[in-house]
């Protein structure tokens, strides 16, 4: 082992030793276990629990996103062709079905005006779309407008239910997109599009089937 590697290993050991020392006086807390079953969003809509897609639309819209509901392949394609006219180029994530890919020139994520991805699920309670790291994070984050397709059957009442539905098929990482990128770090003034797309559109595919 060379000196640089030895130094790195020594620094790591010192850091871990300090962490163990700091945690030595702390009370041990048992793992809380699995998420509780039956946890649902608050009752709304005249005393009835909301449909998950309705709740997702409410919460994501409130956060500055846009939700479009499409009944089938034909309506999805017609809407996509009209929507795509706003853009000169696109960066498409892996896993997006060909039917849901706009007819635009492909570009690198940092140059594309539109990024398109396919959610693996959604949580209505938080208005969050679950995006897999296997799709390619650059296309999810760099274009100024992000179009996310999500199947209505993959919209769950809670984040716990959405994660549970993916058990056994989890990627290395899941990202939660709950609206356009916003920051108020400077002067407490909210600015969109600072750390990611300033515009988020969720297109919900309401007809079940293989997209």
Image (tube, rainbow, N blue to C red):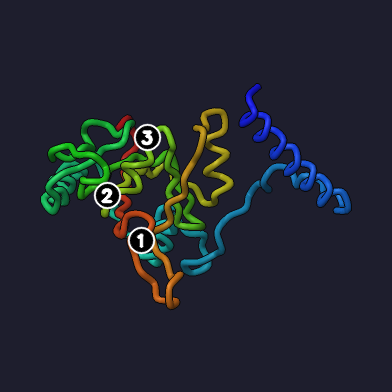
Query: Which residue is label 1 attached to?
Result: 194
Q: Nearer the viewer, residue 4 or 143?
A: 4
Residue 22: tell me if it is visible.
Answer: yes
Query: Which quarter of the rendering shows the N terminus?
Result: top right
| Disc nearer the start of the sequence (1/2) | 2
Assess whether mark 2 and mark 3 are in contact (beta carbons under 8 angstroms).
no
Instruction: Give the class, few, some or many, for how many residues have Cα within 10 Å of label 1's Cα (few <14, many ≥20).
Output: some
- Residue 209's image quarter? top left
- Residue 100's image quarter? top left
Question: Looking at the image, how many numbered discs can be counted on the residues?
Answer: 3
Separation of residues labelled 3 and 1 (CA atoms): 22 Å
Instruction: Give the class, few, some or many, for how many residues have Cα within 10 Å of label 2's Cα (few <14, many ≥20).
Output: many
Disc 1 secondary structure class:
loop
- Residue 3's image quarter? top right
Residue 143's disc is 2
Assess whether mark 1 and mark 3 are in contact (beta carbons under 8 angstroms).
no
The residue shown at (65%, 35%) is 8
Left or right: 177 with respect to 100?
right
Query: x%, y% of residue 123?
Result: 48, 50
Q: Nearer the viewer, residue 117 or 1?
A: 1
Query: x%, y% of residue 156?
Result: 49, 47
Looking at the rendered image, the disc whose residue lies closer to the viewer, 3 or 2, is 2
Residue 52's disc is none
Disc 2 secondary structure class:
loop
| Disc nearer the start of the sequence (3/2) | 3
Query: x%, y% of residue 141?
Result: 35, 48
Query: Which residue is label 3 attached to?
Result: 135
Separation of residues labelled 3 and 2 (CA atoms): 15 Å
């Amino acid at each position: 082992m060379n000196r640089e590697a030895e130094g790195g290993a020594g620094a790591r050991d010192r850091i871990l030793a300090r962490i163990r020392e700091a945690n030595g006086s702390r009370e041990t807390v048992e793992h809380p276990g699995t998420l509780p079953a039956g946890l649902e969003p608050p009752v709304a809509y005249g005393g009835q629990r909301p449909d998950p897609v309705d709740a997702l639309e409410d919460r994501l819209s409130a956060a500055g996103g846009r939700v479009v509901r499409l009944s089938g392949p034909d309506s999805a394609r017609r809407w996509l062709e009209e929507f795509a006219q706003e853009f000169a180029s696109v960066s498409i994530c892996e896993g997006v079905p060909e039917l849901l890919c706009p007819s635009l020139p492909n570009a690198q994520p940092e140059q594309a005006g539109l990024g398109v991805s396919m959610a693996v699920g959604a949580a209505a309670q938080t208005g969050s779309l679950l995006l897999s790291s296997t799709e390619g994070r650059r296309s999810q984050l760099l274009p100024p407008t992000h179009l996310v397709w999500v199947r209505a059957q993959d919209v769950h009442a809670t984040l716990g239910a959405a994660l549970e539905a993916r058990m056994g098929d989890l990627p290395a990482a899941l990202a939660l997109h709950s609206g356009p990128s916003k920051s108020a770090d400077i002067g407490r003034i909210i600015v969109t599009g600072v750390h990611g797309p300033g515009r988020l559109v969720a297109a919900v595919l309401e007809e079940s089937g293989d997209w």
